[in-house]
Image: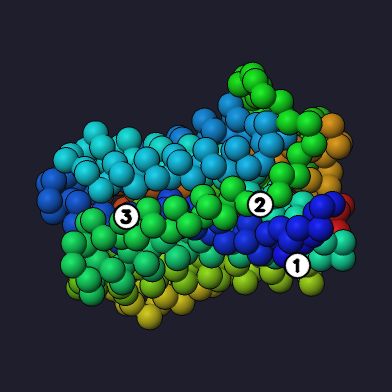
């Protein structure tokens, strides 16, 4: 809690972090349910990956059109708008009757995440009392990745052990969104003199020339790490069910949760290592995790898949936070927000395009062959980036 000028106690950054986590949980809530949708509607694995990837399209569109909207109109209105979009997404899934509503739900979820990621992160950081900035940064990181991880865990548990597997997860999330909206209403506004009628404009990708040497390897590392997240959130539950013959949806949700949990741990470790060591170390740990994922596909081993999820998530979190820190530190202040947004655009491209490629390859190679092809390609990319930044680490520490 914090105290405003009138002496009233107001909600502080832990509450903002909880709102952040609830909002992000909705973006991954359908993950363990795609197999049920596929059985009900009779579509292919390619369609599953395209439905998943529509989310990234929404995120990228929101980042390009409204990445700095909360700087102009204030944090609370954008947070409430994002929560409303998340609720609309849940309603699409709740009343789905075919692919159109699934696509609409994922697109709205992407819009919500694009608005929420910037506004909620800024809110958490700005509500921190002096001397608590580091805690607030960790809280924002944990809320983001923790929320993404809790979505499939919650949906998997409810779908496996409760009635209405394709309805109850979204009803529960709607209830949580209602609580989050009430909490958001009472959060202090941290933007002074917000505008009432901002203009949405295409911001484009801003990468100043002096940042490009740092941006290129950082962006490639982010792309590879998010490709791993995309693989687990879109394809891994199907692999677990069809290839490993594990039909328990709670297990599938827990495996996806473990990736994001490990990512949160990796991001928390970055401060101890510093950017110069964290970026190459994260890439190399991510490479090792991808090798284990590939091995699990080759020998059809659940323990190897879990080990790959934990190691890969750890490397992804370590590399991604180092990438953001390096790019943000290298960018001039007047272009810092735009440069970091460009990094997020590359990252979310990584969570969508490779996964759609996996879905397309399943038509010719099957799920196992497509997954192996994916892991080989991303291993080569990540290893090359890791070796490059090991030899030429970023200047920022």
Numbered mark located on residue 246 in the image:
none
| 124 and 57: which is toward the camera | 124
Residue 83 location in percent, x, y?
49, 45
Other-residue count near label 3 (Cα within 10 Å), few / some / many at <14 / 14–19 / ≥20: many
- In primary-sequence order, the first of circles 1 and 2 is 1
Residue 366 location in percent, x, y?
23, 54
Report which residue position mark 1 lands on: 135
Q: Residue at horizontal 63%, vertical 42%?
A: 76
Q: Is residue 268 above or below residue 93?
A: below
Residue 301 location in percent, x, y?
32, 77
Residue 347 location in percent, x, y?
57, 45
- Is 362 displayed left or right of 89 in the figure? left
Report which residue position mark 3 lands on: 170
Q: Is residue 104 visible?
A: yes
Q: CA distance from mark 1 to mark 3?
A: 31 Å
Question: Does the residue at mark 1 contact the one at mark 3 (Cβ under 8 Å)?
Answer: no
Q: Residue at horizontal 61%, vertical 65%?
A: 142
State the colouring used for the structure image.
Answer: rainbow
Q: CA distance from mark 3 to mark 2?
A: 25 Å
Q: Is residue 53 visible?
A: no
Q: Residue at horizontal 71%, vertical 26%?
A: 195
Numbered mark located on residue 187 in the image:
2
Quadrant of the rendered image containing residue 33: bottom left
- In primary-sequence order, the first of circles 3 and 2 is 3
Q: CA distance from mark 1 to mark 2?
A: 18 Å
């Amino acid at each position: 809690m914090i105290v405003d000028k009138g002496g009233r106690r107001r909600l502080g950054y832990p509450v903002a972090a909880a709102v952040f986590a609830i909002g992000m949980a909705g973006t991954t809530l359908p993950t363990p349910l795609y197999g049920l949708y596929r059985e009900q509607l009779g579509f292919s694995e390619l369609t599953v990956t395209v439905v998943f990837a529509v989310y990234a399209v929404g995120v990228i569109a929101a980042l390009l059109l409204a990445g700095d909207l909360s700087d102009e109109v204030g944090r609370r209105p954008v947070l409430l708008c994002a929560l409303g979009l998340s609720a609309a997404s849940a309603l699409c899934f709740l009343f789905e009757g075919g692919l159109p509503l699934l696509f609409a739900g994922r697109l709205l979820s992407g819009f919500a995440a694009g608005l929420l990621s910037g506004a909620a992160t800024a809110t958490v950081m700005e509500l921190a009392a002096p001397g608590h900035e580091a805690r607030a940064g960790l809280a924002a990181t944990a809320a983001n990745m923790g929320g993404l991880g809790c979505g499939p865990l919650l949906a998997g548990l409810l779908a496996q052990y409760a009635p209405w597997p394709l309805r109850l997860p979204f009803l529960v999330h709607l209830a949580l969104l209602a609580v989050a909206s009430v909490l958001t209403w009472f959060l202090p506004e941290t933007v002074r003199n917000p505008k009432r009628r901002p203009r949405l404009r295409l911001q484009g990708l801003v990468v100043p020339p002096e940042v490009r040497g740092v941006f290129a390897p950082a962006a490639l590392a982010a792309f590879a790490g998010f490709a791993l997240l995309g693989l687990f959130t879109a394809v891994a539950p199907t692999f677990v069910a069809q290839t490993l013959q594990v039909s328990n949806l709670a297990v599938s949700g827990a495996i996806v949760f473990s990736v994001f949990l490990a990512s949160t741990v990796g991001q928390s470790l970055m401060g101890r290592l510093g950017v110069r060591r964290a970026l190459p170390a994260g890439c190399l740990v991510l490479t090792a995790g991808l090798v284990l994922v590939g091995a699990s596909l080759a020998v059809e081993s659940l323990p190897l898949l879990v080990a790959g999820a934990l190691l890969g998530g750890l490397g992804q979190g370590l590399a991604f936070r180092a990438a953001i820190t390096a790019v943000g530190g290298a960018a001039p202040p007047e272009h810092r927000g735009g440069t970091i947004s460009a990094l997020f655009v590359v990252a979310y491209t990584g969570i969508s395009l490779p996964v759609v490629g996996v879905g397309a390859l399943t038509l010719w190679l099957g799920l196992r062959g497509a997954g192996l092809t994916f892991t080989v390609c991303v291993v080569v990319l990540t290893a090359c980036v890791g070796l490059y930044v090991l030899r030429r680490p970023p200047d920022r520490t």
